[in-house]
Image (cartoon, helix red, strand yellow):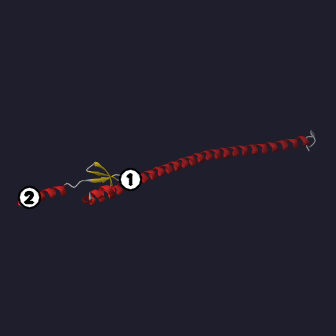
Amino acid sequence: MKSILLAFIALASAAVAAAPVITVDLYGNVFQDGQNTNQQIGGFARENPLLAPQIDAAVRQTAIDGRAYIAAQVAAKEAEKAAAIAAAQKASSDAIAANADALKTAQDSVAALTQTLAARDSTIATSGAYITALQKKIRDLGGVPPSP
């Protein structure tokens, strides 16, 4: 009797020690030790009530994995969006800098032309004064009547 009891205990401990690994996919299919049982969660749980803790853990783990996957996808899309925004901001800043350089060049050109025009205005004024002085001298000499 003692040997039967020891054999039963050994068999029971072996059964407990080798508890099956239950996994569940996103479609609700149950896998036992990596093999598809061709059953959904509810049917498998009804037929195997002793495996309820493993089934519950598998469902929870699937939900956690699904949430982690979704979070990773969202984070990747947000990073992609942030990179696109940063690239657009850099392109905008580069365009602004290029336009600022072009504006500075145009302003320098206008300033140089303004100086040239001022020099010409001065030359014209000097020439006008010289012409007026020559006309006065010619009139004084009695050569040409005064201009209207």
Left or right: residue 99 compared with residue 27: right
Report the residue marked by disc 1: 69
Mark 1 or mark 2: whose residue is earlier in sequence: 2
Residue 22, percent across and down?
Answer: 28, 54
CB atoms of marks 1 and 2 within 8 Å? no
- Residue type at numbered disc 1: Tyr
Q: In percent of the image, x 78 and y 43: which residue is there?
A: 124
**What count of labels does the image hold?**
2
Residue 131, percent across and down?
Answer: 83, 42
Image quadrant for the C terminus?
Answer: top right
Q: Nearer the viewer, mark 1 or mark 2?
A: 2
Mark 1 Cα shell of 10 Å, populated few (<14), some (14-19), many (≥20)? few
Is residue 41 positioned above or below 123 on the image? below
Quadrant in the rendering for residue 10:
bottom left
Q: In percent of the image, x 14 and y 56: which residue is there?
A: 11
Report the residue marked by disc 2: 4
